[in-house]
Amino acid sequence: MSCEEIAVCAVRLRENLCLYFEELECDAFCKDKTIKRFFRNVNSQLLVVRPDLNVAAFEDVTDQEVKSGSGMYFDIHCYKTTAPSARMPVAFSVQVEDKSYYMCCEKEHGKMVVRFREGEVPKDIPGESNIIFFKKTFTSCSSKAFKFEYSLEQGMFLAFEEEDSLRKLILKKLPREDEVDETTKFVTSHNERHNL
């Protein structure tokens, strides 16, 4: 035996029989690919970002508005992660006129809210981030519909809520992950004419 020190990490065996190391660095994310998509809710409305009004809401839009694509055609940035996961980490950005905005979550007045901030989505994220969501299939029977869970708070999903005749984009806490809540259902398409 030598007198060399050997570094030892505590490990834990979870229910899925995977071995996890304790006290290691948190997840890191590296951008893998970007896809362009429109977002629709269960009412077939398009998600539109209006930074001048500080709002993102699902709206009925005219063909003329859709052709401009301003604030409606999202980049979904898919990331690779250092942590083993069946969920795909994604971030969102959108062009409005000649500026790029990224989606993030912030705490305001004790409540988590969705905001769009001017700037670009980073290529690499060394740890936790308020721009990362986990893309999940909405239900096992609905492979073209998705829900997006906020990475920093388990059970918190992107959703829409009616407020003053608008269907605003919000974060919504679901009591159970497998709960079917139509307000958290999103269909993405590269064609604005796509119907649910």
Image (cartoon, grey):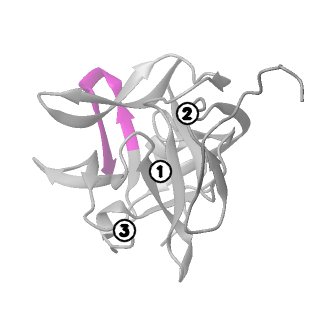
Q: Position of residue 112 (x, y in %)?
A: 24, 36
- The residue to which callout 1 is attached is 63
Q: Indicate yes or no whether the magenta region holds residue 144.
A: no
Q: Residues within 10 Å of mark 1 (few under 14, many from 20)?
A: few
First in sequence: mark 3 vs mark 1: 3
Q: Give how far across and how far down residue 75 sits, in percent.
A: 60, 38
Q: Is residue 62 visible?
A: no
Alpha carbon distance from label 2 to label 3: 42 Å
Q: Position of residue 38 (x, y in %)?
A: 53, 50
Amino acid beneath label 1:
Asp
The range drawn in magenta is 48-59
Give, as a three-letter code, the residue at label 2: Glu
- The residue labelled by disc 2 is 23
Q: Residue at x 61, y 21 (%)?
A: 122
Please name the residue that numbered disc 3 is placed on.
42
- Measure how far apart labels 3 and 1 are at the Cα level: 19 Å
Graded by Cα atoms within 10 Å as few (under 14), some (14 to 19) or many (20 or more), the crowding at tag 3 reads: some
Q: CA distance from mark 1 to mark 2?
A: 53 Å
Q: Secondary structure at mark 3?
A: loop
Residue kind at label 3, given as amino acid type:
Val
**Front tag of 3 and 1:** 3
> Who is closer to the viewer here, 6 or 181?
6
- Vertically, is 62 above or below 9? below
